[in-house]
Amino acid sequence: MELIEYNLEDELFDKYNLKVLEAVPNRKVFSILTDKGEKYLKKIDYPIKELYFIYNSLEYIRKSFNRVVSFYPAKNGEIYTNYKGKNYVILNKIEGREGSFLNPVDILYMTSAIMELHSASSGLKEVLRKALWKETGQEL
């Protein structure tokens, strides 16, 4: 996905009640500084059903591990918005830094965080299995 395909118009950000002060390309998203803090703008190119799968999984994990990305809702309460035929999400920035596999302290911190994340996801598969069965009658 090319960043050139993004619409960075005020009307898009109005749907989120945000005023953008600065937008900087960052890999496949834009880092945006807004009147409500630092965020990420991401254009999604997959079905909305998959977006909700991601959202619901993160919300489940967040119950016991809050160091995961969260969605900034649009004015209408949705986690995404459609603007000029393209779907966008805005994510709240979480503080962090890139770890180094050459630094033993970083390795200890990263492995501990991965263990916490894994523990927080315990039970998620069963929740997803029940949701899929309820929605489609299919097994996971």
Image: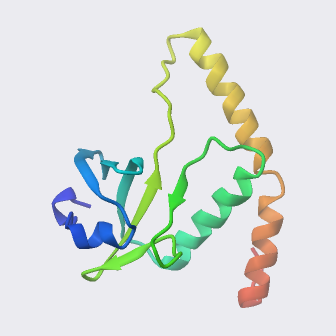
Question: x and y percent of residue 96 in the render?
Answer: 50, 30
Residue that lies at the very extreme toward the left in this rendered image:
4
Residue located 66% across and 66% down the image: 56
Question: x and y percent of residue 12 in the render?
Answer: 28, 71
Residue located 23% across and 47% down the image: 22
Classify the position of the C terminus by image quarter. Answer: bottom right
Q: In screen coordinates, is 105 left or right of 95?
A: right
Q: Does residue 98 sit above or below 55 in this rendering? A: above
Q: In screen coordinates, is 13 left or right of 77?
A: left
Q: For this rendering, which residue is in front, 84 or 50? A: 84
Question: x and y percent of residue 27 in the render?
Answer: 29, 45
Classify the position of the N terminus by image quarter. Answer: bottom left
* Quarter of image, res 111: top right
Residue located 50% across and 11% down the image: 102
Q: In screen coordinates, is 136 left or right of 119?
A: left
Question: x and y percent of residue 53 in the render?
Answer: 61, 69
Residue located 47% across and 27% down the image: 97
Q: For this rendering, which residue is in front, 95 or 36? A: 36
